[in-house]
Image (cartoon, grey):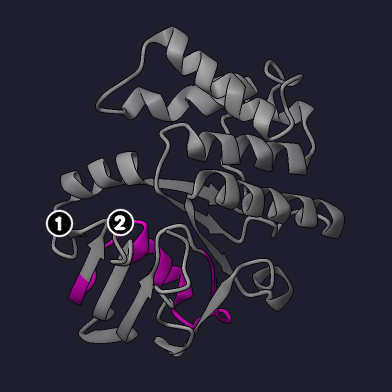
Amino acid sequence: MSADPLIRLEDIAKSYRLGDAHVPVLRGVSLAIARGEFVALMGPSGSGKSTLMNLLGCLDRPTSGRYWLDGEEISRASADRRAVIRGRRLGFVFQNFNLLARTSALQNVLMPLDYALERPSPRQARDRAVQLLTRVGLGQRLDHEPAQMSGGQQQRVAIARALINAPPVLLADEPTGNLDSRTSREVLELFREINAEQGITIILVTHDAGVARHADRAIRVHDGLVVEGAFADTAGAHA
């Protein structure tokens, strides 16, 4: 299999306009993430890690620099192209779960398929959603709404939803931030199992060193720069 990294950033900068001033947030970030890696993106509040996650997730574009995802250079991609890339190649898990209220777990998981360019048949879609919910331990909760589930169960629904389009990359933004310590460990172990079983590249965004230890490698961001762990050892990374 190719040893080329799945994700490569080269001298990425991002600044925002504040009145007449440009405020730099990222100051020249270069990094690589291999296929199948489980990586923690770490940094304190204000470090630039959330901006970096938004760029990795094609939610924003860099001011300068280049970004390759799965062989495609996308740093100048249009909003429409970035939306297509998000739908095909990226899954997202958030701290606040972002589930639809008064909607069953099954329908929450199926929701991203409403925006897919190539939709499976309704039977295929339901079968895959049931399979994913069963895999995350919620096979008996298909018809439960978010209000009927614990925080850990809601996050498991969110993980299943993120996987419904079989993306090569899963971005998890502080996914244990609203969970107790025991449930956090269970969710982090689930990420590790999914990474091992399916070979999905997982990028776990966190400020917590204890959470980051569940990943194979930590990329540390400070004052808009990567200060540690920028490049994958492609010789030792998962194929």
Does residue 4 lie above or below 80 as drawn? below
Question: To which residue does mark 1 refer?
Answer: 77
In the image, residue 46 lies in the stretch drawn in magenta: yes
Q: Is residue 100 left or right of residue 239?
A: right
Residue 138 visible, this angle = yes
Q: Quadrant of the C terminus?
A: bottom left
Question: Label 2 to label 1, Cα distance in Å?
Answer: 9 Å
Q: Residue at x 59, y 51 (%)?
A: 196
Give me the residue at 68% from left, 74% from top: 208
Residue 207 placement: quadrant: bottom right
In the image, 65 versus 39, the foreground residue is 39
Residue 73 in magenta stretch: no
Residue 33 vs residue 62: left or right? right
Q: Secondary structure at mark 2?
A: loop
Image quadrant assignment for residue 137: top right
Q: Which residues are magenta?
A: 38-66
Name which of mark 2 and mark 1 comes first in the sequence.
2
CB of mark 2 within 8 Å of CB of mark 1? yes
Q: Which numbered marker is on residue 58?
A: 2
Question: Compared to 29, does 126 lie above or below?
Answer: above
**Dot 1 surroundings within 10 Å: few (below 14), some, or many (20 or more)?**
some
Residue at 24 percent across and 41 percent down: it is 84
How far from the left and from the top, in percent, is residue 199?
49, 50
